[in-house]
Each structure stands twice: as C-alpha cells, then as structure tokens.
Amino acid sequence: FQYISRKFFGLKNTIHQRDFDAFWSWFGKSLHVLRYQRHINALWQQGLIYGFMTRDDVNAALKDMAPGTFVIRFSERYPGQIGIAYVGSAKNQIKHYLVGPNDTAGAKKTLPDFLSEHNQFEKILQLNFDPESNSVFFKKPVPKDRSFSQFYSPHSQNIQKPKDDGYDPLDKLQNF
C-alpha cells in the first residue's frame, strides 16, 4: 500500500476527490486485467506478477542478477498494461518492455505463451510472502518453464511434426 499511497496521494492522510478519481481510473484498469485476462489472476496469486512496483524498485531488484532474469509488474504509465523488466545481455543492463495488445490478445495467446516464445526472458524473480514478518521478498530466480509450464496453452508447446508425416506444408500467401 506504500506504493499506492506515495504515487497517488503523496502519503497524505486526507485526499481530494480528483486524486481519488485519478487513482481509480488507473487502479480500476489493473483490477479489470486481474479479473478478466486469462491466467493473470492465477499468476499474481502465485507471486509471478509483482503487481505494483516502481521502475526504480524493479531496477534495484534486478541489480546484480544474471542476464535473462525478469520481473513482471503493472505499468505505472499505462493503466492496466503489464510491463516486463529484464536484465539484458550484459549484467546490470536492465530493460523494460511494455506488453502490447498485439503480443497477447491480438495474437490470441496468453502472457505465459508470450514469455515462452522469447529467449531474453529466462528466469523469473518470483515473490514469496513471509507470514511471520508480514513481508514480501524475492526468492532466487526460477527458470520460466518451471514457473509457467502449467499455464502454457497446449498449442504453444512447440511440438515438432515429423518431416514426412504425409501432409504438405502451406505455401506463404503472395499478393497479386
């Protein structure tokens, strides 16, 4: 709640209606995604999507991690959209990717399917909750296939057809 209180209300005890409205226009879109996009709620409940985290916090979490380590969160700038921060090819080269509609919904695939297709995302920095200290912490990076395989769509599993299976491949369409 610190993130929300700081970002939208400036840690004030009393808020104005315009601040409240701005918060709900952003937060409401995130809740809509959690409720209606396939697998997102389950990913969040398992600690695979952090949820609400500043870019600086993400950079700090990924600092000194191996290339390919990533964190999934809701975008601060684009309400209801998901961002993936990851360590690029060099250590401490942190990149941020905004998952676009054509990456998932337009392509008719889930976020786990999208992640499975991109080699720059190798290990997720997953969250754990410690009930004794009532705090959230990151655990060691986990290979993405171990964390997401239960969410992969059957068609996304790259099943190789035998070369001579008795069927002809389709030719690419040409414009006439």
Image (cartoon, helix red, strand yellow):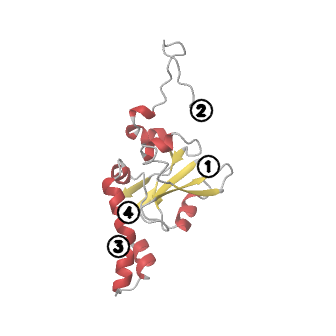
Image coords of residue 12 (percent x, y): 39, 85
Between the residue at mark 1 and the residue at mark 3, the CA separation in whole angstroms equals 36 Å
Query: Three-letter amino acid code at disc 2?
Result: Gln
First in sequence, mark 1 or 3: give its number: 3
Q: Which mark is residue 174?
A: 2
First in sequence, mark 1 or 4: give its number: 4
First in sequence, mark 2 or 1: give its number: 1
Give the residue furthest to the left: 35
Q: Which mark is residue 30?
A: 4
Numbered circles on residues, count: 4
Q: Residues within 10 Å of mark 3 (few under 14, many from 20)?
A: some
Give the image quarter of residue 14: bottom left
Q: Residues within 10 Å of mark 4 (few under 14, many from 20)?
A: many
Query: Three-letter amino acid code at disc 1?
Result: Ala
Residue 113 left/right relative to 67: left
Which quadrant is home to the C terminus? Answer: top right
Residue 129 seen by the camera:
yes
Q: Which mark is residue 66?
A: 1
- Secondary structure, mark 4, is helix
Between the residue at mark 3 and the residue at mark 2, the CA separation in whole angstroms equals 48 Å
Image coords of residue 101 (percent x, y): 46, 53
